[in-house]
Amino acid sequence: MIIIEIVYVVSAFLLALLGFNTVLLSLIYLLHQNQQLEAPSQDHEDGYPKVVVQLPIYNERHVVERLIDAVSQLDYPRDRLVIQLLDDSTDDTVLHAAIAVETAREKGMPIVHIRREDRTGYKAGALNYGLRQTDAEFIAVFDADFAPRPDFLRRVMPYFLDDARLGMLQTRWAHLNANYSLLTRAQALALDSHFVVEQTARNRGHLMMNFAGTGGVWRRKCIETSGGWQTDTLSEDIDLSYRAQLEGWHCLYLPNVDTPAEIPPLMMGFKRQQARWATGTIQCMRKLGLRILVSKLNPLQKLEAFLHLGGYFAHPLMLLVLVLTLPLLWTNRLTGLPLAGLGFAMLGMPSEIILSQQYLYKNWAERLLMIPMLLLIGMGIAVSNTEALFKGLSGRPVSFARTPKFQIDLNQPHKWAESNYVLPMDHTTWLELIFCLYALITFIVALEHHAGAAMFMGLYTMGFASVAFTSLWQTWAAQQRRALRKNSWSFSGSD
């Protein structure tokens, strides 16, 4: 039993440490929130360099036209702009893309449709392939679910002209469909916290920050001297941005420049996205950990880098605390152990959310009502993220699994159910139901032995239930919609 107590205490302490770090980042943000960066002036178009806009896509029939239409409206000198649609698709996205590219060309947009023989290296491989097709000095990257604003390049390029050592610039993600559902509203809170508070704190606080994979611009020389896009992790964006900073390149984050994107509307898509990020981030920690340790970074920068790359360890720690609580309750050994640390670990997230919502929205107080939903989802995805984390630790190659996008239409809110991009449930949903039952039993036991533990176990129960039953409902809805459409086709055919 002493071993269980030690593991429990260590897990609670590490969770508290991660929670304290979010509080620290909030404090750093507060110190720098009024530090406004004035955009360098660029009065003459002759001074603008050549830019290639890379659009890596894979099976994105629902959003590829929106993407191409958005980049076709970029306000930048045409003689210094090239758009590359890096299309690795294997479905009818290729046809949709070809038509959209031709339409853009007819409007005078310098866009090329690039296809590879295979998906070697996934997104990193596509970016490398496109880079070899151009001599552009700067590279902007937008994923399929993004819709950059027309003035994007004119707002960000002057910063590169003003600082020869600026290697990467990241902008803030905004949201095209935040109000679609409780799930998208909760995700918007989490994304806002990261992009307003955490990215600002890391960048202005001279800590290591990351490129978010899209909605940013790179200097070609920075990419090349930092080792290029590499394909040995699922987070090629974090990997390259960390290597660039270790090579001495500057990175800049602009919270006042936003790039709208679609939030995953389905639970299985959200879980897949989070799992991929968890695997890729841990792969980067394995790959770069020693290099960070022996670098010239100061101790705080090194610690923050490891807390940043190791943030997904919160999920297996949460599962450990859950699993160990029941035997500690049954043996009356939980009293006196540091549950207070777990409470403190939960304070950081609300502080970041409040600060980010105050910065972005006039109705920020109303939006805080989604905090409980975000808290439940964060607990509920612990199973899939824990599995993903161990995949990253294993060192074995992991396939890139895309997050499906649907171009959600609020006038047809359930049209996504007709798409074959809807992900089926997998084993993680059943594991979530098992953990939900375990947490419920622990909650009932805790009611008699430990009120503080009961509160946490209640949250665990509702968290796993929220994630699992949302997945079940969305899977059922998709099956019903497809069956209805199939029956309508059969009826029409009988005429």
Image (spheres, rainbow, N blue to C red):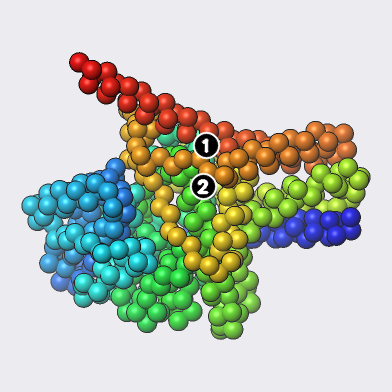
Query: From this viewpoint, which residue is outermost toward the front?
Result: 494
Residue 430 sits in which quadrant? top right
Q: Nearer the viewer, residue 376 or 154?
A: 376
Q: Looking at numbered disc 2 in the image, what kind of residue is underneath it?
A: Lys
Mark 2 or 1 closer to N-term? 2
* Residue at x 48% of width, y 45% of height: 270
Q: Nearer the viewer, residue 8 or 371?
A: 8
Name above or below for residue 456 compared with residue 195.
Answer: above
Q: Which residue is mark 1?
A: 471
Element on which disc 2 rests: helix
Number of numbered discs visible in the structure rendering:
2
Name above or below for residue 339 compared with residue 7.
Answer: above
- Locate the N terminus by quadrant: bottom right
Label 2 close to label 1 by CB (< 8 Å): yes
Q: Is residue 365 visible?
A: no
**Left or right relative to 91: residue 439:** right
Q: Which residue is mark 2?
A: 271
Position of residue 134 measured from the top left corner of the image (x, y, whole percent): 21, 72
* Residue at x 84% of width, y 46% of height: 327
